[in-house]
Amino acid sequence: MTVSVDDVQQAAQRIAGRVRRTPVIEVAPGVTFKLELLQHTGSFKPRGAFNRLLTAKENGELGGQGIVAASGGNHGLAAAYAARELGVPARIFVPETTPAAKLGKLQTLGADIVQVGNEYAEAYEAALQAQGESGGLLVHAYDQAEVVAGQGTVGLEILDQVDDFDTVLVAVGGGGLIGGIVTAIGDNANVIGVEPVLAPTMNRALHAQQPTDGPVGGVAADSLGARRLGDLAFAAVRRHQVQSLLVDDDSIVAARKELWSSYHLATEHGGAVAWAALSSGAYKPADGERVVVVVCGANTDPSTLI
């Protein structure tokens, strides 16, 4: 199964009025930020969550049992927010390592929160079991067509908001965001996936020529902590020959601090990963190259930025 540009365009129509059209700002000649950290719940995730829930509602699949989701934090926030807006209950499974900042926000959204295991994969297994018992709607964090199509609306907005660009830098965890963006942008620009060295899901999949499980670690694991790249993302990045670029934890930490000190953008570590590629020099644009950096997540403890 694949996601098409038509799927992304239909998602944009479906979720219009439910999500924010986030701004772009030029921060230096040839460098533009897409500020998806300003989206509802502090990340791009509501786009996919709303498209999944609204599609299910159209098809008569969204009932009183509500939804079930597993998340490192950001997807859970988005799924809980979308469920609350549509008036259905949400049961969200998260790892025991989920940061307090994300847990607190989940609680304010009225979700039933279950903490299981040390990483996303364990929370997902528990969510699957609960979904089978309750019959609730499973809202996957990154590997459902409706979710990927919803995330792809970020790419449609970039096409509309930025007059000329050559490259888009996107952080990769499970791959829902990059799978959607590259589907939307297609051959209009080069899309590059930026990954933590300690959680290289796309890099590993490209080398193995298929999504492959692997260890997860590092400072960005709470938001980019999938063990493997999603099948839909893998199909999209192979189809468009997306390059993987790795950045280490020191570069991610420095990029996050710079986003705050230079641009007053409070991001979580995962939200700083794409910028780390530029700020560390891991990605060196050619002369005159115009780059868009997707700043994708803000769910952090602000006291850690000082």
Image (cartoon, rainbow, N blue to C red):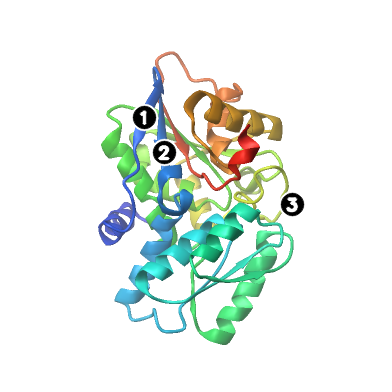
Is any part of residue 253 visible from this angle?
Answer: yes
Comparing 149 with 264, the one in front is 264
Which residue position is annotated with label 1? 25
Residue shown at 38% from the left, 80% from the top = 61
Which residue position is annotated with label 2? 35
Residue shown at 67% from the left, 46% from the top = 199
> Which quadrant does the C terminus fall into?
top right
Q: CA distance from mark 2 to mark 1?
A: 8 Å
- In the picture, the disc for residue 215 is 3
Q: Say if 51 sits above or below 291 in the image.
A: below
Q: Amino acid at mark 3?
A: Pro
Residue shown at 31% from the left, 42% from the top = 157
Q: Residues within 10 Å of mark 2 (few under 14, many from 20)?
A: many
Q: Amino acid at mark 2?
A: Leu
Q: CA distance from mark 3 to mark 1?
A: 35 Å
Q: Amino acid at mark 1?
A: Ile
Answer left or right for 121 relative to 239: right
- For label 2, the SS is strand
Answer left or right for 20 relative to 304: left
Answer left or right for 4 relative to 160: right
Comparing 305 with 19, the one in front is 305
Question: Do the numbered discs 3 and 1 sit on residues whose CB atoms are within 8 Å?
Answer: no
Comparing 16 with 260, the one in front is 260
